[in-house]
Image (spheres, helix red, strand yellow):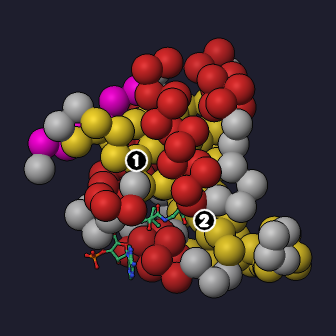
Amino acid sequence: MNLSIVQMNSEHIDDIEKLEKECFSHPWSRNDIAAQLENKNAHFLTAEVDGKVAGYIGIYELYESCEIANLAVTSDMRRKGIACELLKSAVSGAISRGRDFITLEVRESNTPAILLYTKLGFENAGRRKNFYTSPSEDAIIMTKYFKEKA
Ligand code: COA
């Protein structure tokens, strides 16, 4: 598999819009995705396999923290380690920009995503009651510190 992780650019937007619609009940619109290209706090990466969009990750960084906004891999490309590579690249970028920890929310029923984050060292940090709609569901908060807490 010829996998590259690259900065998201305007040529990826059509495919990412399609992927959002496939994966989420409240998908980001084309405008939401395009706006990230202008957002200084946003760091969005695209996974390309043989030049085709296979997944993407978006994180926001502010002061010492960062938050995963989106992560998705096309259904035909799952279980090949692509999300793992996207996350590792996002984390190493955040560390290089001086961030201390990364956090995210995930639907409590989303076992594949929870197992992925756990595999990469994220820990359960709490719950937000009824955070999601369509369907209504709690969010599990997961966090990973890049260095030991004092
Ligand atoms: N069942 C069990 N474990 C899974 C899994 C599944 N369906 N998918 C991923 N994992 C876990 C495993 O531990 C896996 O390691 P292994 O293959 O060595 O067992 C590890 O995650 C890494 O998997 P990887 O191949 O990198 O994940 P992926 O590229 O298939 O992408 C998602 C994982 C969650 C991003 C993908 O399923 C997806 O796009 N889902 C829809 C969108 C979504 O839910 N995004 C997350 C929002 S918080």
Vertical order, 98 against 128 (above or below): above
Mark 1 Cα shell of 10 Å, populated few (<14), some (14-19), many (≥20): many
Report the front residue among 123 and 85: 85
What amino acid is labelled 2 in the image?
A: Thr
Q: In this view, does 59 lie to the left or right of 89?
A: right
Report the front residue among 15 and 61: 15
Which residues, given as a range, are shown in magenta?
A: 2-7
Which residue shows up at 50% across the image and 71% down it? Answer: 113
Q: Mark 1 points at which residue?
A: 55
- Residue 85 in magenta? no
What amino acid is labelled 1 in the image?
A: Gly
The answer to whether any part of residue 41 appears in the image is no
- Residue 4 in magenta? yes
Q: Where is residue 36 in the image (x, y as percent from the top left)?
A: 64, 26
Outermost residue on the right side: it is 130
Q: Mark 2 points at which residue?
A: 143
Q: Is mark 1 within 8 Å of ligand 1?
A: yes
Secondary structure, magenta segment, majority class: strand
Which residue shows up at 51% across the image and 48% down it? Answer: 19
Q: Quadrant of residue 2?
A: top left
Which mark lies nearer to you, 1 or 2? 1
